[in-house]
């Protein structure tokens, strides 16, 4: 059950401000570590600011979703949700300047397949990279190197409660107990769209899965011009529980606000931030001698279908595009 889960106890936070503080602290810790190495000053402009790190995370989380969407065989929705949650959690306490999000992104997807028992082999997994066999082998090597690190940084809390199961539960409840709505299935398409959009925000770190699912249902009803107040007050027996009803409605407003203000970084902004990120992972600034393990990337513009040498690595462009 969610309320006794590690997700509820350790990974559901009180406010957006708390998430921002954690990300800022991860940024500060990396700056301090880099300054202590003597390679750079803490205020050096080469560093990414917390808001720039967040923009990079948004970009790579979208790439993660695109990768999962076109994955063969088709990846279950719960696996995609689990992978995205792992990615969000990892970068609450770690900096993209220390661990490149490209390899963390794929490691999250790889681990999610295992945890959610989506049976694909490692060869099948990297086969979804638009790469040569040698490049796929290199990518798998990096994924396996990072897997334990990811598990450790998640505090071994690997079970993720997604909103998709409670969403189906609410639809069944509407069909069986809410006669005022003749065909609840009319809500599915718009509610699915809501779930897809809210997944890109921080809602999964702030609200219970059932609350997200119910908000998707009610939002879909509202857009279809269907008044479902009686479902809340009568079927869910919230008529007399004004406190719970108030909290629920406040949460719904917050989720809608998160969706409304969410923006992916512009391509030109991403290009600039990638250059700064590449500098942070360069040999001059890297905090480890094992660059391949820490870096996980090469020039983003380098694309080749021929076999690469042992020193060459896969890039963003080797991910299968969603279009």
Image (spheres, helix red, strand yellow):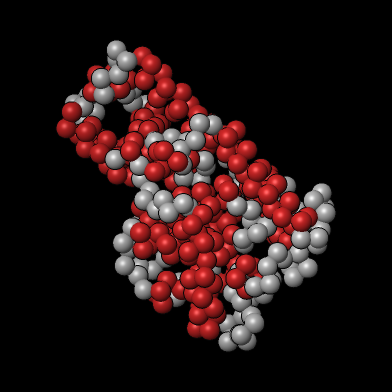
Residue at position x 76%, y 64% from top? 285
Give the side of residue 94 with respect to residue 178, left or right: right
Q: Residue 217: x percent and y percent? A: 35, 34
Q: Is residue 107 visible?
A: no
Q: Is residue 5 above or below residue 155?
A: above
Q: Is residue 294 visible?
A: yes
Q: Residue 92: x percent and y percent? A: 57, 47
Residue at position x 83%, y 54% from top? 41
Residue at position x 45%, y 41% from top? 10
Q: Is residue 35 or residue 305 the one in the foreground?
A: 35
Give the side of residue 297 with respect to residue 46, left or right: left
Give the side of residue 298 with respect to residue 151, left or right: right
Q: Most extreme residue toward the front, as rendered?
A: 36
Q: Is residue 1 or residue 259 the one in the foreground?
A: 1
Residue at position x 54%, y 31% from top? 15
Q: Is residue 178 or residue 275 the one in the foreground?
A: 275
Q: Residue 91: x percent and y percent? A: 57, 51
- The quarter of the picture where the N terminus appears is top left
Q: Residue 47: x percent and y percent? A: 76, 53
């Amino acid at each position: 059950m969610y309320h006794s889960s590690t997700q509820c106890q350790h990974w559901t936070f009180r406010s957006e401000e708390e998430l921002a503080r954690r990300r800022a602290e991860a940024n500060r810790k990396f700056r301090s570590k880099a300054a202590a190495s003597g390679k750079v000053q803490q205020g050096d402009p080469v560093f990414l600011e917390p808001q720039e790190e967040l923009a990079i995370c948004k970009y790579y989380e979208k790439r993660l979703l695109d990768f999962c969407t076109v994955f063969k065989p088709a990846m279950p929705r719960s696996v995609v949700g689990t992978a995205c949650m792992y990615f969000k959690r990892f970068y609450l306490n770690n900096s993209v300047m220390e661990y490149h999000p490209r390899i963390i992104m794929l490691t999250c997807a790889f681990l999610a397949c295992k945890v959610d028992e989506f049976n694909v082999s490692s060869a099948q997994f990297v086969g979804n990279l638009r790469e040569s066999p040698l490049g796929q082998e290199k990518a798998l090597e990096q994924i396996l190197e990072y897997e334990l690190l990811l598990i450790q940084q998640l505090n071994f809390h690997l079970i993720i409660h997604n909103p998709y199961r409670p969403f189906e539960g609410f639809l069944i409840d509407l069909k069986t107990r809410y006669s005022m709505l003749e065909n609840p299935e009319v809500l599915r398409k718009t509610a699915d769209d809501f779930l897809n959009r809210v997944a890109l925000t921080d809602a999964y770190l702030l609200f219970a899965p059932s609350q997200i699912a119910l908000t998707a249902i009610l939002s879909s009803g509202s857009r279809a011009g269907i008044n479902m107040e009686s479902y809340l007050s009568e079927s869910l027996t919230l008529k007399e529980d004004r406190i719970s009803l108030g909290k629920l409605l406040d949460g719904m407003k917050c989720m809608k606000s998160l969706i409304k203000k969410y923006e992916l970084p512009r391509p030109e902004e991403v290009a600039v931030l990638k250059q700064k990120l590449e500098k942070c992972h360069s040999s001059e600034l890297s905090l480890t001698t094992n660059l391949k393990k820490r870096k996980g990337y090469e020039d983003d513009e380098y694309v080749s279908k021929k076999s690469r040498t042992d020193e060459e690595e896969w890039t963003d462009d080797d991910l299968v595009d969603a279009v």
